[in-house]
Each structure stands twice: as structure tokens, then as C-alpha cells.
Image (tube, helix red, strand yellow):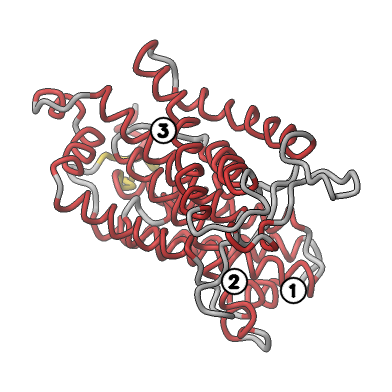
Amino acid sequence: MIRFEKRPQPSRALSLATPLLAVLATMIFGGLLFMALGKDPVTSIVTIFWEPLFGEFAFYYRPQLLIKGAPLVLIAIGLSLGFKAGIWNIGAEGQYIIGAIFGAGAGLAFYPAEGWFIFPLMILAGAFGGWIWAMIPGFLKVRFGTNEILVSLMLVYVAEQFLASMSLGLLKNPEGFGFPGSRNLQQYEPAHNAELLAGSGMHWGVVAALIAVIFAYVLLTKHRLGFAIRVTGEAPRAARFSGVSPARLILFCMGLSGLLAGLAGMFEVSGPAGQITIDFNVGYGFTAIIVAFLGRLHPIGILLAGGLMALTYIGGDIAQSNLGLPAAAIQVFQGMLLFFLLAFDILTNYRLRRQHTAETA
């Protein structure tokens, strides 16, 4: 018989190797999935991972890595701080939506006026929207002991209904011939999150994501608060004895993750997406959970994982267009990353041992 035996200490080597093993296993089993759908597995995998970087039209796809990766990294950084402390914000998708609504609303409130202050105001509004939405499950957990996983997740569906309401009501474009959706912020220069370098994919959302990575790294390695976050996640009792306030830490982690998710929504709606619509959200908040764990909850790892996940987004779109792969298959392929990451993660804390039947008896 084979049994799991807990390691005295987690294996550092396996901890570092697990993301690579998860990616490799995803390629193998993803290829089998594509083969079951009647597609050539090697061609499918090459299309997803090679074409966006080195293919014929790579010059067009490479900037998309920054555009797709920035919101994933920004959201994942906020989530990772909470996850490290054992605080499980699963509702970043809702905070992303609310941040986009607040940010777009702040910009459109001044339409068609001009002014340098409009975009900074949108940034503040987007951050506040995400923050306040995340503070609802944070406050309920601190005050009433509710489960932040359930509350934050349920608020995603509330945010989606709020998004539909804004698209059909308050933020609806009065010149849109009755179609749902707001004015196009790309056509309103003071509120447009334009590329900083034409054709590079670099916009203010990318800058914010890089700043968030640096901030999180410094916080976790150099600041007392980062130490409190790490200790709370690894040894909650020791954290309480050292004077860490669980309530304050919950509110900080929930608020910061919501703030960054709200910023991601604001930068997206004012840039690549351009407007508030019923189907504005595309699952970045949920995908960022995969990015956070694939990056081992480490800022640098999250930056690399965000690039990898952005690559699967872009390569997946190419595979759908060129090979006829269904969108659902690409989503399953992306989900495999988290599945295999968690599966291989068991080996970090446990080793396989052969057990004789006589011992069992």
C-alpha cells in the first residue's frame, strides 16, 4: 500500500519545482483534452505557448501580454497578502466590477469637460469602490464572525447585477441608440487610459501592477506588518502572543486586496475595455486566484505567473481562431493549472511511503 507521510519540514526544492511541474502536467493533460476534441495536441500546445511570442504576428500579440497580464498581477498581489495571512477573499471579481463602475462614473460625471484632474479622480474613485466592496465581508467577519469566503463570493453576483443596472440605467450612453453600455472612455481624452508608448501595451495599469509588486515585496521582507502577515498565516497563536490584532489584519488585507482589484477594474474600463457594458467582466478576479497560487504567493512569482496566464489567454484566443478550439476547452486548460498546482503541492508537505499489508493489519 502507498500512504502519505507528513514531512518534518516542507520541502523547499519541491516548493520551487511545483509550479513547473504543474505547467508541464497541464501541457500533457491539456494536450490529451485537445486530442479528445479531435485536434492535434502538439499543434494546440505550440499555438498557445509559442505563437504569441514567436509566431508570424508576434509583434501584435506581445503588447497584449502587458494588457492582459496587468490586471491579473494587480489583483493577485492583493489576494496573495490575504492568503498568506489565512484571509480568503474570493470575491475580487466583484471588487473589480465595482472599481470599474466607480471609476467610469467619476470620469463620465465631468463629460464633456476637459481637465487634468479627471483621470486621477477616476483612480481614486476606482480604488475606493473596490475597497468599500471588500470591506463588507471584512467588517462582517470582524463584527459577526461570518465566513469571508461565502460573503465575498456572493457579493460577486450582486456586483454583476449592479453592473447590468448601470449599463441599462444611470451610466447608459444617451447617444447610444438604446444599446446598453456607457459612453466610450477611449473617445473622451481626459478619462482615457491610453498607451504611454504607442504600440507597446504599456499603460498606467501596467505601471500600477509593477508598483504593487515592488510594494508587496518590500512589505513582506522589510516591514513589521509583512512579518505579522506571514506569522499569522503560519502560526496564528504565535501571532496573537506577539501582539498582532486579528481584526486589524483582516480589515487591512481585505481592504488592500479590494483596493487593488478596484484599480484593476478602473484601468481596464478606461483603457482596453473602454466602456461599462453588461459583459464587461471577463473573470480576471477568479483567474487571479490561480495566478496568486501559481506564483507561490510571492510578488516576483506572481509577476511571472501573470505573464504565463496572459500567454494562455492570448494563445487560447489564437487557438480558438486558427484551430477551432472551443472557449470552454481553453478555460478548462487554464483551470488545470490550479488543479495540478494544488495536487503537486501535497508533495511539498507529504512524502509517499510504501506500507506493507502486514503493518496495516
The percent position of residue 292, horizontal first and vertical second, equals 42, 50
Q: Residue at x 38, y 13 (%)?
A: 145
Amino acid of disc 2: Gln
Rendered position, 235 above or below 199? above
Q: CA gap, disc 2 to disc 1?
A: 26 Å
Say which element carries label 2.
Answer: helix
The residue depicted at 67 percent of the width and 62 percent of the height is 186
Q: Is residue 341 above or below residue 358?
A: below
Marks 3/2: CA–CA distance: 30 Å
Label 3 vs label 2, nearer the camera: 2
| Horizontal and vertical percent position of residue 4 | 34, 40
Mark 1 or mark 3: name the one nearer the start of the chain: 1
Q: Which amino acid, by three-letter code, is at mark 1?
A: Asp
Q: Is residue 207 left or right of residue 172?
A: left
Q: Which residue is mark 1?
A: 40
Residues tagged 3 and 2 counted as in contact (Cβ below 8 A):
no
Q: Which residue is mark 2?
A: 64
Indicate the amino acid at tag 3. Answer: Trp
Q: Are marks 1 and 3 in contact (CB under 8 Å)?
A: no
Q: Mark 3 Cα within 10 Å, few/some/many (few <14, many 20+)? A: many
Between discs 3 and 2, the one toward the N terminus: 2
Q: Dot 1 lies on which element?
A: loop
Q: Nearer the viewer, residue 208 or 333?
A: 208
**Label 2: how many residues lie within 10 Å, few (<14), some (14-19) or many (20+)?**
many
* Crowding near the residue tagged with mark 1, few <14, some 14–19, many ≥20 C-alpha atoms within 10 Å: some
Residue at far left of view: 242
Q: Position of residue 289 (x, y in %)?
A: 48, 46
Of residues 122 and 130, the one nearer the viewer is 122
Residue with the mark numbered 3: 88
Name the secondary structure under disc 3. loop
